[in-house]
Image (spheres, rainbow, N blue to C red):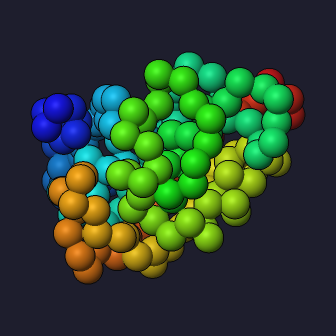
Amino acid sequence: MEAVVKGRLVSATARDDAGAEETVYLIDGGMVDTTGIAALLQRGVRRIFAWYNNNDALAPAGSAAQSESASFAYLFGVPQPTDTMNSLAGPNLTQVFAAELYPAVLANLTDPGVLLARLTNVSVLPNAYLGIGEGLVLDELLILSNARADAFL
């Protein structure tokens, strides 16, 4: 289970327009965190761009549609119905962000006119289960949604 918690990390070297090198990370969060965010937090990454790409589209809170919102809700300690495509550990073990941030994050991820959530200077809660220590503050967390946008289509 420890290997699953740590996720699978692939790194590559990228160059910006000026030719400066930096390391970028691609991750499969596995069965503990399907977003890959927790594994990046374990490594102390301070800026995360997460593109949500799961089996079912995100749906607004209270929607009757199948939704994988638990993938994000659990990171905020918010219980949500789920299937086996989400975190098996649940919100009590995988919370890394303050719960009060979640409603706005989900609203932005499921609003067809927005479809992304951006948090800046967000404190990360320590989490012994995930191996995330104290004192981490993200400069930026940007999540791109997979929810349906008729305007885009």
Residue drawn at x 56%, y 40% is 70
Residue drawn at x 47%, y 31% is 86
Q: Residue furthest left?
A: 3
Relative vertical location of residue 51 with respect to residue 92 in this rendering, above or below? above
Q: Is residue 112 visible?
A: no
Q: How many labels does the image show?
A: 0
Give the percent coordinates (x, y) of residue 60: 77, 43
Give the percent coordinates (x, y) of residue 8: 20, 32
Q: Which residue lies furthest to the right in this view?
A: 151
Relative vertical location of residue 149 with respect to residue 48 in this rendering, above or below? above
Q: Identify the image quadrant of residue 11.
A: top left
Q: Relative to residue 33, is residue 142 drawn left or right?
A: right
Q: Identify the image quadrant of residue 112.
A: top right
**Relative depth, front residue between 51 and 124:** 124
Rendered-image quadrant of the N terminus: top left
Give the percent coordinates (x, y) of residue 3: 13, 33
Relative vertical location of residue 12 with respect to residue 117 in this rendering, above or below? above
Q: Can residue 62 be seen in this view?
A: yes
Relative vertical location of residue 26 with respect to residue 127 in this rendering, above or below? above
Rendered-image quadrant of the C terminus: top right
Q: Which residue lies furthest to the front in this view?
A: 92
**Relative depth, front residue between 100 and 46:** 100
